[in-house]
Image (cartoon, rainbow, N blue to C red):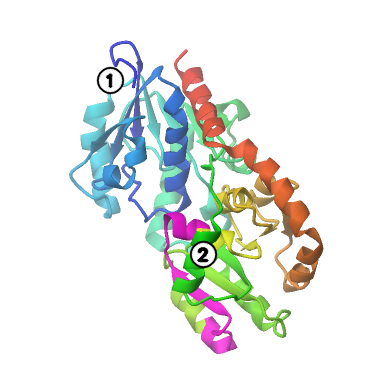
Amino acid sequence: MADSAKATGIAINLLWCVPGKVGGSEQYLTRQLAGLCGHSEFNLHAYVPQGFAAAHSELVDVVHLHEMPLTAHNRGARIWYESTWLNSRTKNAQLVHHGGGTLPMRGNSNTLLTVHDVQYLTYPEYFSAVRLRYLQAMMPRSVKRARTIAVPSAYVRGVLMEKFSLPGEKIHVVRHGVEALVRSEENIAHVRNKYGLGNVEYFIYPAMTHPHKNHAFLVNLLAGPWKNRNEHVVFIGSPGRAHEELLALVARLGVSDRVHIVGRVEGLERDAFVAGARALLFPSQYEGFGAPLIEAMSLGVPVVCANTASLPEVAGEAALVLPLSLDAWSEVPNILDNTSAELVQRGYLRVQHFSLVESGNDLAATYESMLK
């Protein structure tokens, strides 16, 4: 870390970032910060919920972590702390970076706001009434008040410009950075044995079971066009709002012998699940970015994804990008027979565009533009 007397004081609001509970946005921000490790010109102070430091020890040499005395599971309490505890500690910072998509009602006026996505505009039905009202009230005023906005993709940038009439120069694309992942045949064998997969050929979908993740699409694919095939699908990820509906659908369609709902796995086990798959299938209806695509490419796994939201932008020419119809996906196993090797090689090239260093450089350039 740089000498705080000489370095720039930047405060980062991560009070919303409850470890393991906020999905991809947690990875997006923590990986960005990890990517700043070579930028000693910044004196970074992150304000985080209780338990964050233990979950993200990789950041202790990059940013000073200040934990509030609550876990922030209660949104109302977190919002209150942003306007009181956080405000009192960041009012004199040269720049305050709010990472959770909205700005507090009070605080330092030189603000960078990270907006991960604006899914509520496209799929309001996937949000609780309380959450939807909050976003409808807070998002428009937040994007207007923020001096600068950071987004993970050009897709999100375009939506913000269109829906909120924002000038393009106000919105900076800060790429998602993915760590270099290592494929381990030993770990793959361990995971197969531990979870009873044996020599089963499977496709992987790593995502929380939220409605927009569209797990049901793959279940219907198994029960329909792939009914007479031998492929299995493994779902890894925490239970979400559509979890019970997913379990009911698997039972009703009689595919429980080919669908493996594992739940949340982390670290090397998660990587091994992905690395051992024939391909990563990603039928999500909405993504602000879609980091699992790049992670799979890093592990040498072919990717098949929907042509929705930011996914085509992230995939580039390194994935099979298809419309969300069962007919369009019906021949995926056969197509992969002839294209997997080429997709893997394209994936390795694509990953280089989304390194931690590149993400950190994007964020550093945004900070620098605001501190001139």
Of residues 202 and 245, which is closer to you in this image? Answer: 202
Q: How many residues crowd around disc 2 within 10 Å: few (fewer than 14), some, or many (20 or more)?
A: few
Residue bearing the label numbered 1: 92
350 relative position to 30: left or right:
right
**Does the magenta segment cover residue 270?**
yes
22 relative position to 60: left or right:
right
Query: Marks 1 and 2, how far apart in space?
Result: 40 Å
Magenta highlight range: 249-271
Q: Residue furthest front?
A: 186
Question: Is residue 250 positioned above or below 163 on the image?
Answer: below
Instruction: Please name the amino acid that badge 2 sits on.
Output: Glu
Residue 166 is drawn in which quadrant? top right
Figure label count: 2
Q: Position of residue 348 (x, y in %)?
A: 67, 45
Residue at 23% in and 41% down: 81
Q: Position of residue 20 (x, y in %)?
A: 37, 55
Q: Position of residue 251 (x, y in %)?
A: 52, 87
Please say if the residues under marks 1 and 2 sit with CB atoms less than 8 Å apart. no
Question: Is residue 305 positioned above or below 176 on the image?
Answer: below
Residue 146 can be seen in this image:
no
Number of the label disc, if any, that sits on residue 125? 2
Question: Is residue 259 positioned above or below 114 on the image?
Answer: below
Residue at 51% in and 42% down: 179
Residue 219 is drawn in which quadrant? bottom right
